[in-house]
Image (cartoon, rainbow, N blue to C red):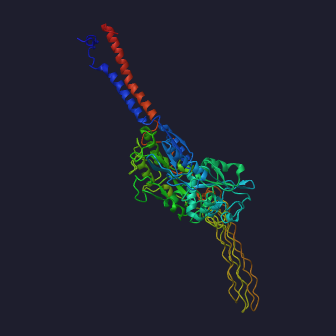
């Protein structure tokens, strides 16, 4: 008989066979579940993604990084510019890169000869397989630093001609008469300091492409005067001249302009940098004749005229330029809400099955993390509202780009997402309505008529013509003028008395001010008919009371055979009572945007940044794991200890081994 059998403790009467093995089985089960639960969160836990690129998109990428940090996705992003990001990708230093423009297929003529000699601005020849994935939209804004009499100017508006003149050296003083047509207020007699980018920049590319397509002759002439050659369709390297100041990065452009000592400065930048610091930007005249800001809704409206390869044509997803943008229609979009310098931004990611391999540093764990990150960016990360991307100056991308982007994400080596790019199942993107339209488009407000070209600055948005109107009830109609005196047989009839004035409205919000009183009755001379008196229109808002009664008789009748008797003057209408203050049925208008400010703050789609669900996995998987293990321990440990103690007691009573 084997030793183990001979020395096995005797089973107590009534004890179940295998009861001693139950704790061990439970413990094994607990450990198995622990491994499975940990596996749920460790597909990429501890994996760090490294990336460089677009400073234009930098604030959005940073926001999304913090949104998913508690999912075990670690991201190091350096916003060193689109051109530098693509170079780092080519050097094999990045897992992905961010760029506002595609890889350069020809020499960038905006770069100087010295830059070309240093290898900057030359054609790029990608050596690793890649896809473009659109991530966000935005407007290239123009921050400026102007004040007069110690007070900052915050309502500057400029035409495209003004902007191009400033950045080609044709306008060098802020009080130039050319600016007066757009901004008739007094501007200081100080020199203009254009602030440009010193590095290769997607912001420069988008701005220069707009100039090339709207002011081609002027922009080409400027480039030739600096570099002896035209800049082409666009350039990432702005040719500097005159008083221009060059800064490295979008954040440094913004920082320079905001300094008190740099009054007179104006520079181009993504709207996010001005919005987050509360700095004013120029209202730009659009093709419809309205001065607009690069708000999320104005950008979304403008980009409805963009053409996307593979969405608006038959470009296949395998084409390297799938999802790239053509913005010609954006520059000429006739919608009065459109902001003309609007564009999309992209990330460049590894592609499995491409002719070239992925970067050597990339692996499946990185692919799992990157695909989960981009699933969030294209779905929940597009949310708008109090904590959404519009709150930091960006606009969500439309459904076609979301689907195309998710399709490209599925080709990342090590893909670990679970969003269907065709049906968008598991894609919690709250920016589409039931028809697939961006809700920001359906809710986009029209501009104020005060922002129409030619409207006076500082006008009342509810009354852009400047005529005194109000929102309260005016006084009642003034009394009719009295009868004119009798005229002679050949004389002209007397003129009727003046009508009473309409009641004055109070300062609060209410209905429209009352109409002026009726004119007086015609004179009763026997000659020509008298003229009716003209009533005066009511003034501003408030709830008016009833006007006073009219006067007695009218003005004198005309002279004829005999002179008509003198009539009395027409009575004035009573003044309207003061309207109540506070909120009535009226609206509040933001003087900076000219748009209606809704009551109650953010929209219904506000999403708290701390509530994140990446690829359908629950938040805080580690906490879930710990909780599950604790529950299993409660189940498994007591039976295990109980069985062990029973064996000890049994062994002691039978003299078996201890």
Is residue 639 something one can see in this rendering? yes
The image quadrant that residue 7 belongs to is: top left
**Is 630 drawn above or below residue 548 in the view shown?**
above
Give the camera-side residue of 79 and 41: 79
Give the camera-side residue of 362 and 403: 362
**Is 613 drawn above or below residue 285 in the view shown?**
above
Q: Is residue 2 left or right of residue 477?
A: left
Q: Is residue 407 left or right of residue 256?
A: left
| Quarter containing the N terminus | top left
Residue appearing at x 44%, y 30% in the figure: 626
Coordinates of residue 195 in the picture (x, y in percent):
65, 53
**Is 377 drawn above or below residue 4 in the view shown?**
below
Coordinates of residue 333 in the picture (x, y in percent):
53, 63
Give the camera-side residue of 263 and 317: 317
| Quarter containing the C terminus | top left
- Extreme residue in the top direction: 655
Give the camera-side residue of 27 and 143: 143
């Amino acid at each position: 008989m084997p030793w183990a059998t001979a020395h096995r403790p005797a089973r107590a009467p009534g004890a179940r066979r295998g009861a001693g093995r139950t704790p061990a089985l439970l413990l094994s089960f607990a450990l198995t579940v622990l491994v499975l639960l940990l596996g749920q969160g460790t597909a990429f836990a501890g994996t760090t993604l490294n990336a460089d690129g677009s400073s234009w998109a930098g604030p959005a990428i940073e926001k999304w990084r913090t949104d998913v940090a508690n999912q075990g996705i670690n991201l190091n992003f350096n916003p060193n510019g689109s051109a530098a990001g693509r170079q780092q990708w080519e050097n094999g230093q990045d897992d992905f890169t961010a760029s506002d423009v595609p890889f350069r297929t020809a020499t960038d003529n905006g770069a100087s000869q010295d830059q070309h000699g240093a290898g900057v601005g030359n054609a790029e020849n990608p050596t690793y397989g890649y896809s473009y994935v659109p991530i966000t939209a935005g407007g290239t804004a123009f921050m400026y630093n102007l004040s007069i009499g110690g007070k900052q100017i915050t309502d500057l508006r400029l035409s495209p001609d003004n902007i191009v003149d400033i950045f080609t050296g044709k306008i060098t003083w802020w009080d130039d008469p050319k600016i007066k047509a757009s901004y008739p207020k007094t501007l200081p007699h100080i020199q203009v300091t254009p602030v440009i980018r010193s590095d290769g920049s997607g912001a420069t590319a988008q701005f220069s492409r707009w100039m090339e397509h709207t002011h081609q002759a002027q922009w080409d002439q400027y480039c030739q005067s600096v570099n002896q050659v035209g800049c082409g369709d666009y350039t990432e390297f702005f040719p500097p001249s005159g008083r221009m100041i060059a800064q490295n990065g979008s954040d440094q452009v913004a920082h320079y302009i905001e300094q008190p000592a740099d009054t007179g400065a104006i520079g181009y930048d993504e709207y996010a940098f001005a919005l987050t610091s509360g700095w004013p930007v120029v209202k730009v005249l659009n093709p419809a004749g309205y001065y607009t800001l690069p708000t999320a809704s104005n950008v979304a409206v403008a980009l409805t005229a963009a053409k996307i390869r593979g969405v608006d044509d038959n470009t296949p997803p395998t084409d390297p330029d799938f999802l790239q943008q053509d913005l010609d229609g954006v520059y000429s979009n006739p919608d009065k809400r459109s902001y003309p310098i609007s564009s999309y931004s992209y990330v460049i990611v590894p592609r499995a099955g491409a002719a070239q391999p992925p970067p050597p540093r990339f692996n499946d764990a990185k692919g799992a993390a990157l695909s989960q990150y981009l699933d969030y960016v294209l779905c929940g990360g597009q949310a708008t509202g109090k904590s959404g991307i519009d709150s930091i100056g960006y606009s969500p991308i439309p459904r076609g780009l979301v689907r195309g982007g998710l399709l490209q994400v599925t080709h990342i080596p090590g893909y670990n997402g679970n969003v269907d790019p065709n049906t968008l199942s598991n894609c919690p993107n709250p920016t589409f309505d039931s028809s697939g339209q961006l809700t920001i488009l359906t809710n986009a407000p029209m501009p104020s008529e005060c922002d129409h070209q030619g409207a006076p600055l500082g006008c009342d948005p509810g009354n852009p013509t400047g005529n005194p109107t109000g929102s309260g009830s005016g006084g009642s109609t003034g009394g009719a003028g009295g009868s004119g005196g009798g005229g002679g047989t050949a004389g002209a009839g007397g003129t009727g008395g003046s009508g009473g004035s309409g009641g004055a409205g109070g300062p609060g919000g209410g209905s429209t001010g009352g109409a002026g009183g009726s004119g007086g009755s015609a004179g009763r001379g026997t000659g020509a008919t008298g003229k009716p008196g003209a009533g005066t229109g009511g003034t501003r808002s408030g709830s008016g009371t009833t006007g006073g009664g009219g006067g007695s008789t009218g003005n004198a009748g005309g002279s004829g055979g005999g002179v008509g008797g003198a009539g009395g003057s027409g009575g004035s209408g009573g003044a309207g009572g003061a309207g109540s203050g506070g909120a009535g049925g009226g609206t509040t208008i933001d003087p900076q945007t000219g748009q209606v400010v809704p009551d109650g703050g953010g929209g219904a789609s506000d999403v708290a940044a701390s509530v994140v669900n990446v690829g359908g996995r629950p938040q805080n998987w580690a906490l879930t794991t710990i909780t599950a293990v604790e529950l299993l321990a409660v189940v498994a440990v007591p039976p295990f200890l109980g069985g062990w103690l029973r064996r000890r007691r049994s062994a002691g009573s039978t003299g078996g081994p201890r």
